[in-house]
Amino acid sequence: MSGPITLYENFRALFYTPFYLTFEIGAFEAEGVSVVMGESDTPGEGAKASLERDDAISWGGPMRVLHFHDKDPTSDLVCFCEVVGGDPFHIIGNKPNPAFKLTDLLDVRFGNFIEAVTPWLCLQEDLRREGINPADLSRFDGNTVPENMEAFKAGKLDAVQVLEPYAEMLLREGGHLWFEASARGPCAYTSYYARRQILDDRSDELQAMTNAMAKTLVWVHSHSAIELAEVVSPYFPDFDIDLMTPALERYKQGGIWNTTPMLNVQGIERLRAGLLSGGLISREIPYDEIADMRFVK
């Protein structure tokens, strides 16, 4: 008998809430599949495990799958269940700007997110589509999120690119919400991925995992932000439910979480455009090369 599937976490983040919920609401057990969580010290470790092991899959950005295929068109790593189909990052500014335009970033000192490449690559594509050369920004790209937050509060940066609940923290300390990247529309951000061989060899289990996520997404959209916060709070011991609730509500209102596990073609195309213009990949990798939606009903 096969052992449990190890599902590797990419890194700990509030926008991954549906992934934690599958464990907490018993979605896997209800589908009769044994899944254990594997933690990654750095983003990408789960992808490495997925390539090397017969019992491991990962959640993470389709960016990584596109990157693997750009380097090796014969790679059999594929996305098979999308969960986060919108960009979860925000730009917080130091003054009210209800009519914010991306061109406003030309006039400020801006700190972008550096812990992963996708947030900046997608944003720089937004800039290009508005006729802005990203190189023209006064951009500080050497700070971690805590360092950017400190610089922002000290008046050394005018705007920062952050995820929740750090955006909520800054808003409570006088920051202003300038831009929600989810407003650009579909942008493939997080899915399950594994080798096609595992999809073949353990199809019943991966079908059950996809079914479990489909039901979890229904749960996400039928429950309040405070209910989500209460259920996932064990994963975020440093954050109060009072802090997480408005952050999760912002994500719900922004529509970052899918209603079904289908990997959105438009979302992949939008992500791919950012990776191409940002130089991470060098060719227009077809959807069918990196996606296998056999388990989505």
Image (cartoon, rainbow, N blue to C red):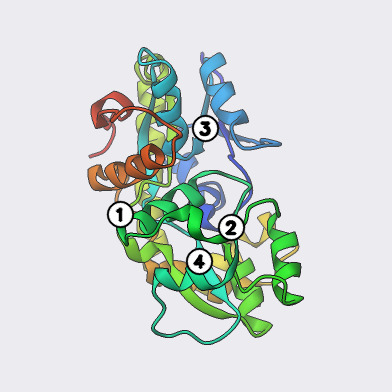
Q: Which residue is drawn at 57% across and 58% down?
A: 14
Q: Mark 3 points at which residue?
A: 58
Neighbourhood count class around disc 1 (C-alpha, 10 Å): few under 14, some 14–19, many 20 upward: many
Q: Is 199 placed above or below 237 here? A: above
The amino acid on which the numbered mark 4 sits, given as a three-letter code, is His
Report helix, strand or loop for mark 4. Answer: strand
Point out the frontmost of discs 4 and 2.
2
Q: Are the residues at dot 1 and dot 4 in contact (C-beta closer than 8 Å)?
A: no
Q: Mark 1 points at which residue?
A: 186
Q: Name the residue under label 2.
A: 112
Q: Looking at the image, tell me whether mark 4 or mark 3 is earlier in sequence order.
A: 3
For this rendering, which residue is in front, 226 or 15?
15
CA–CA distance in space, label 1 to label 3: 21 Å
Screen quadrant of the C terminus:
top left
- Looking at the image, the residue that sits furthest to the front is 136
CA–CA distance in space, label 1 to label 4: 15 Å
Report helix, strand or loop for mark 3. Answer: strand
The amino acid on which the numbered mark 2 sits, given as a three-letter code, is Asn
Q: Are the residues at dot 4 and dot 2 in contact (C-beta closer than 8 Å)?
A: no
Q: Mark 4 points at which residue?
A: 90
Q: Looking at the image, tell me whether mark 4 or mark 2 is earlier in sequence order.
A: 4
Neighbourhood count class around disc 4 (C-alpha, 10 Å): few under 14, some 14–19, many 20 upward: many
Whole-percent x, y for residue 80 in the image: 35, 33
CA–CA distance in space, label 1 to label 2: 21 Å
